[in-house]
Image: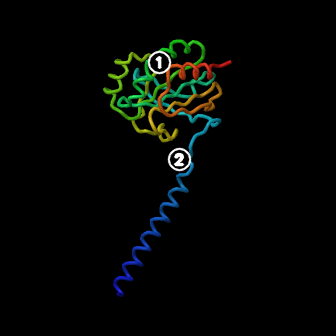
Amino acid sequence: MKKKRVWIRGAIIVVLAVAIVYTIYSAVTKEQHALLQVGDMAPNFTLQDLDGKQQTLADYKGQGVVLNFWGTWCESCKKEMPAFDKYYQQFKDRGVQMLAINVAESDYAVKTFVQQYDMTFPVAIDHTKSVVRTYNIEPLPTTMLINEHGEIVKIITGEMTEQDIKQYMTMIQPK
């Protein structure tokens, strides 16, 4: 009977210790995991695109930005890419830029996908998922619409239609 009480007390102490450690960890990392919302300033980042150029979000200030997070395995992403490219061609000279960020796949897989879908806008790979974590991206695809002032004006999770993409690019076109 005495052994049983010792085991129960030990288990309770372990559960409490885990709860305390989790609470401290959550408090320390709270800011890292804060969800971005419409109206927030889009956090700056720099990633290298498939052409070897540095893509820094702050460099797009003064322009609307469609920031699309995607994966080669994502069926919705495959459906969206032709429309994104079509409207990128129409809107890029009107102050709306497109930046596609692949989530940590191989260079080969991403380059093959880009060639297959004939994508002409900048594509970068977030190999370390640092941008994905900063933007709290889940699920794929997720698209952030950023206005010319660097504010997030819309967050879209899931697949968009061609009509949606055109409407959203029109929405973030600088006045």
Expressed as whole percent of the image width and height from the top left, the position of residue 111 reads: 34, 23
User: Which image quarter: residue 103?
Assistant: top left
Mark 1 or 2: the one toward you: 1
Q: Residue 15 bears which disc, if any?
A: none
Q: Residue at x 57, y 20 (%)?
A: 169
Task: Check the image and tell me how it is coloured.
Answer: rainbow
Quadrant in which the C terminus appears: top right
Above or below 129: residue 15 = below
Horizontal side, residue 138 vs residue 172: left or right: left
**Label of residue 83 in the image:** 1
Comparing 53 with 29, the one in front is 29
* Residue 142 vs residue 34, the one in the foreground: 142
Residue 75 lies, in percent from the top left, at: 38, 29
The amino acid sitting under disc 1 is Ala
Q: Quadrant of the N terminus?
A: bottom left
User: Which residue position holds label 2?
Assistant: 33
| 15 over 168 or under it: above or below | below
Q: Earlier in the sequence, mark 1 or mark 2?
A: 2
Residue closest to the far bottom? 2
Residue drawn at x 60%, y 39% as measured from the top left: 37
